[in-house]
Image (cartoon, coloured by chain):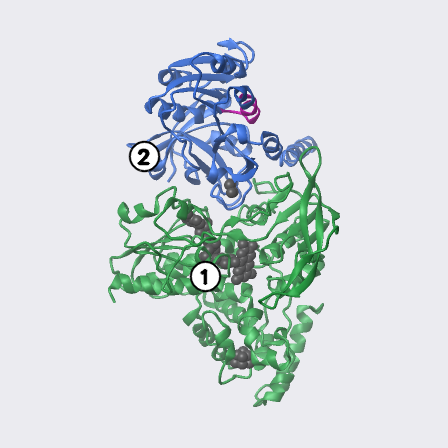
Chain colours: A blue, B green
Amino acid sequence: MNRILAKQQLSEHVFRIRVEAPLIAEEREPGQFVIIQLDSNFGERIPLTIADADQAEGSVTLIFQAVGRTTRRLAELREGDEIANLLGPLGRPTEIRRFGRVVAVGGGIGVAPLFPILQALKEAGNHVTAIIGARTRELVILEDEVRAVADELIVCTDDGSYGRKALVTKPLEEVCSAEPAPDLAVAIGPPVMMKFCVETVRPYDIPVMVSLNTIMVDGTGMCGGCRVTVGGETKFVCIDGPEFDGREVEFDNMLKRLDAYREQEQQALENCKIEEMHR
Amino acid sequence: MSTKTSEQLEAEAQHLLASFEGKELTRKERLAIPQQEMPAQDPNERRFTMSEVTYGYSEAQARVEAARCLQCKNAPCIEGCPVRINIPAFIQAIEDREYNQSISIIRETNILPAICGRVCPQENQCQEACTVGKVFKDPMQSVSIGRLERFVADRARASAGQDAPAVKPETGKRVAVIGTGPASITVAADLRREGHAVTMLEAFHRPGGVMVYGIPEFRLPKAIVDEEIETLKHMGVEIRTNFLVGRTRKLKDLIAKDGFDAIFIGSGAGLPKFLGIEGENLVGVFSANEYLTRSNMMKAYDRERADTPIFQPRKVAVFGGGNVAMDAARTAVRLGAEEVNVIYRRTRTEMPARVEEVDHAEEEGVRFHFLRSPKRILGDERGRVVGIECLSYELGEPDDSGRRRPVVIPDSESVIEVDTALVSIGNDSHPLITQTTPELETNKWGNIITDDTGRTSMERVYAGGDIVLGAATVILAMGEGRKAADSIHRELSGT
Ligand SMILES: Cc1cc2nc3c(=O)[nH]c(=O)nc-3n(C[C@H](O)[C@H](O)[C@H](O)COP(=O)(O)OP(=O)(O)OC[C@H]3O[C@@H](n4cnc5c(N)ncnc54)[C@H](O)[C@@H]3O)c2cc1C
Ligand code: SF4
Ligand code: FES
């Protein structure tokens, strides 16, 4: 079960794996995610967006950045290894229809969840302008894939090492203010990026869909750990989302909630270092 | 609760036993036998460990307690038991030291006695009805039926291991059972026994439902639940974890694509309710479900080994007065909180939690604030909880039901300084299946509507447990499961 069929390194910390998961491949739709756990006893459960699926092969593609405990361990697995637990597809699928003109921003690893949404939006007959951004050239992922799908593509890096030297909000602003104006904006990436994309789009009065990646435990609506305030109401990202109109999302509260365990995690790291010093 | 050690309790029981062993006891003599106390870990020690609080009766204690039973002809206790265990008969068997017979009598109607003996609210069920309690005008003085049930169940577990019940020849019919809580376990066992192929579908990575993700180890050791799951596997029940019906597969497709002949939905009441007050999404506010799941299922209490973090509490407020609230409060104690405050809108007598849990919580230093309710949660500039503001209540005139409703006292706001707030005001039914299956009729609380045989509005689809009753109890979930299994079997066998 859940065997890794292929593994590829996309950049220093970013990996793409194809995992055997016939049922998930059959049912999944763009915008949905899975929860993985690498050890049934002591492992943590973390959400990862489904970047692609192959029904014929019965597999799903996951793209992740090896930054936390679990993603680092996942990056160490090899082809043929199994993922102990894989649950999905979770979350509501993206609302896909013909909106007209769509501008879609993917920041860093956020390009991975964005990609299947772009594919679906394109298939539904939308004109798609894609903006993908990263800190530096090395971290730009899926450029060729996005180029093949989008009508227009703008690549930018913070340090100018590739494409335009700009934050994604700059080209986003330009696209929004140009004629014909977009009918829908999509922004997926680091929370702070999504927050600023929303502020950039807000004056233009077009919906801006964001995909939230809050802290999760079960991913099925049983804990409320993933909750955010949307339009003044509490929503569970795992069952009511992960996508919301960013104009209604209280990003500041969400950003703080994402930091809930930071001190503890840093403390754990510190303890490790102290232990090592003593040894 | 006593401060006696297990050794003292054992010595007393031995002494009593010797005094009446072999004698025919009169009713008066039986009523004179003191109720046997449950041996338990010292409160000061158990604050630091997740291991089970109570040890269970010794054989001598069980025999003394069994001798308190009057063997009433009308056996009101049976009426009080949701699955109608033949209580006087199993207690008589203990008196006769026929423990195998005793467990067989219980198992006729209850397949999870080691669990029920620990978590049933006996004081509202069999023990409420018990004649002995009536004589003393105190249900807490009744025969300790639950402790006796646990005694025989644990004894059977320790001696033989468990024999998997016999399975009839295969019928060729296939049933999908959604969830692995007590309702689903009962359905799976009953239907498998009749020879139907049973596949259980569980969203979590570990089967057992609330009994593994909610109820903590110190109250219900996970090993007991695991044994029950193993028994099912030995019977040939297939258990598929990481399978979320409604997402991994639509309910309808289980019949249409996967060819199941019938479906039982036992998906429980897993959706945590929040109060809807200001500050509820601050960092440091958790549903009891989240806090307990992190601690129990994800084992976050084992900080050395577990990857899942849990918020380190210093001063805690727990909102609610049920079992969930007690479990959350006592978990916080064990995670090292200096101060744990339970905030409850009514008074102690109205608390829905088992009396034993409330007593245990108190012994462990949990503070109770009755007739109080949170008005808002206060945060600092970093979005973290720094306190709660509460309103005080007083009991007003009795309402139509005769209950005195709490009425808010104007301008009674007061602040309790805390850094963690655990919301345990109840759970709603798990919404995913009903949301993704519009054909299923639900009531206004989102519970699935069934007839009295467990049948839903969809053909070949049955439901039971918390998803039908709303958050209830293990034993009621099992009772529902038994009823549904019976009608599923009748439908499948055409009888
Ligand atoms: C903290 C806590 C303490 C409690 N203490 C007591 C007590 O002391 N005594 C007592 O009698 N009762 C107690 N209860 C209540 C009792 O646990 C429940 O009433 C009982 O477990 C309900 O059983 P169930 O079979 O209906 O569902 P559950 O035990 O809730 O099991 C439902 C299962 O279904 C799974 N599921 C849900 N949706 C899906 C889906 N779509 N697909 C697949 N699987 C799904 C869930 O993951 C879960 O495993 C307590 C409850 C809690 C939360
Ligand atoms: S009511 Fe009490 S005393 Fe009477 S048979 Fe039942 S347990 Fe025994
Ligand atoms: S992750 Fe638990 S409710 Fe969303």
Mark 1 lies on residue:
B477
In-front residue for pair B319/A176? A176
Distance in Å between CA atoms under marks 2 and 1: 37 Å
Which quadrant, please, contains the C terminus of chain B? Answer: bottom left
Label 1 C-beta lies within 8 Å of the nearest ligand 1 atom: yes
The answer to which image quadrant residue B12 occupies is bottom right
Nearest the camera: A93 or A52? A93
Q: What main secondary structure does the magenta stretch of the protein show?
A: helix
Q: Which residues are magenta?
A: A188-197
Q: Answer yes or no: is residue B190 visible.
A: no
Residue A191 on the magenta segment = yes
Amino acid type, mark 1? Ala
Instruction: Give the total number of marks visible in the rendering.
Output: 2
Question: Mark 1: few, some, or many residues within 10 Å (few <14, many ≥20)?
Answer: many
Percent from the top left, x then y, of residue B249?
35, 43
Residue designated by label 2: A58
The amino acid type found where label 2 is placed reads: Gly
Tell me what residue is drawn at x 64 percent, y 86 percent: B19
Q: Is mark 2 within 8 Å of ligand 1?
A: no
Badge 2: residue crowd in 10 Å (few <14, some 14–19, many ≥20): some
- Above or below residue A101? Residue A230 is below
